[in-house]
Amino acid sequence: MTDALDLTKRLIAAPSVTPARGDVFDVLESALTPLGFDVDRFICGDAPDGPVENLFATRAGTGDRRHFAYAGHLDVVPPGDGWTSDPFTPDVRGDLLYGRGAVDMKGSIAAFVAAIPPTSAGRISLIITGDEEGPAVFGTVALIDHMKARGLLPDLCLVGEPTSVNRLGDMMKIGRRGSVNIWITVPGTQGHVAYPHLADNPIPRLVRALSRIEAIVLDDGTDWFQPSNIEVTDLEVGNKATNVIPALAKARLSIRFNDLHTGQGLADRIRAIVLEEAPNAEVEARISGEAFLTPPGELSALVSAAVKSVTGIEPEASTTGGTSDARFLSKLCPVVEFGLHNATMHKLDEAVTIQDIRYLTNIYATILNKI
């Protein structure tokens, strides 16, 4: 049997800032091979977003049951300065294990591996990328293509992201809002402020467009999603002179949206407003992911029952938070996200309680015993 705490420590001790590859995947493979898993590792992409390593591990079941997959990532965000101890040296202090990735999400991966039974009636797979915290260009999308090529798409998928808010077990994710970022560039003609008729100031046109965009109420939310929101995340002119009309004005928007919208539809709506105010403007949109929802059903009930049996509480089914790789996997099968307490993820001195790793292992084992 795999010891979840020990495996978490070994994963933390293998630095894996996005894009991750190499040693951290060696550690995981060494834990899966003795359990009878067929492990495929492959590298995708080039700089600056790659190369990225991915791992697909699968083990056939003894019967004709369904294919259950666990998805996660071994890459972590940069640790930053100011840690009490080295971020890549696992450090147990009291009942806490400190280290970058302890919560997000090496502890979860270790718990799942430790929960895998010696045999199972259904197929079990792990879908693990080194590119979730980054652009996610060469990660889970490439893994899905790999699974399709092998004819091994899952029937159900659990994503081990840290979903718990106040204590382990209080929340699971059954969907996420979509995300689109939009860059607006309004051109003008540079000139002296004393001779405005010889120049063309782009700022008023951009301000008018942003004013109209800020007035938009996209929706009031749905039964499962909070209201969509548009946020201006950057304004840039770069004009250091007080007596010069600038030649260019830029803005950036971020829209988080529910399943009443699509990323392309929102981008088209913003583009139309901007071009009405500034016909020569450029509007570039990048859709990070569409909104998705796995309606409450068999998988969420299975996860909820397992959580309650171990922790005594019933998790809230939520769609809050940022994006995750579940946005890609939700196109294949029902997906639910459940994992550790998320209070310290991405922070200095990221830490997980040793008890939570044990509880999570038991929760995952309970789920696997029902598959």
Image: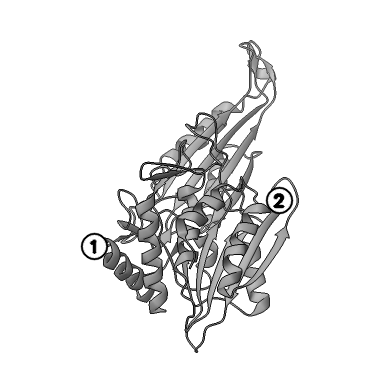
Q: Earlier in the sequence, mark 1 or mark 2?
A: 2
Image location of residue 14, percent across then percent down: 61, 48
Q: Residues within 10 Å of mark 1 (few under 14, many from 20)?
A: few
Q: Residue at x 67, y 69 (%)?
A: 40
Image location of residue 266, percent across then percent down: 51, 52
User: What residue is pinned by disc 1?
Assistant: 312
> Disc count in the image?
2
User: What residue is pinned by disc 2?
Assistant: 50
Q: Residues within 10 Å of mark 2 (few under 14, many from 20)?
A: many
Describe residue 95's horizontal placement relative to residue 263 as left or right: left
Please, what secondary structure does the residue beneath circle 2 have? loop
Query: In the image, what residue type sits under mark 2?
Result: Gly
Colour scheme employed for the rendering of this structure: one colour
Image location of residue 114, percent across then percent down: 47, 65
Describe residue 346's horizontal placement relative to residue 304 as left or right: right
Q: Which image quarter is the C terminus in?
A: bottom left
Q: Is residue 329 above or below residue 121?
A: above
The reply to whether residue 237 is visible in this rendering is yes
Query: In the image, what residue type sits under mark 1?
Result: Gly
Residue nearest the observer in this picture, 308 or 118: 118
Q: Residue at x 44, y 55 (%)?
A: 177
Please, what secondary structure does the residue beneath circle 1 have? loop
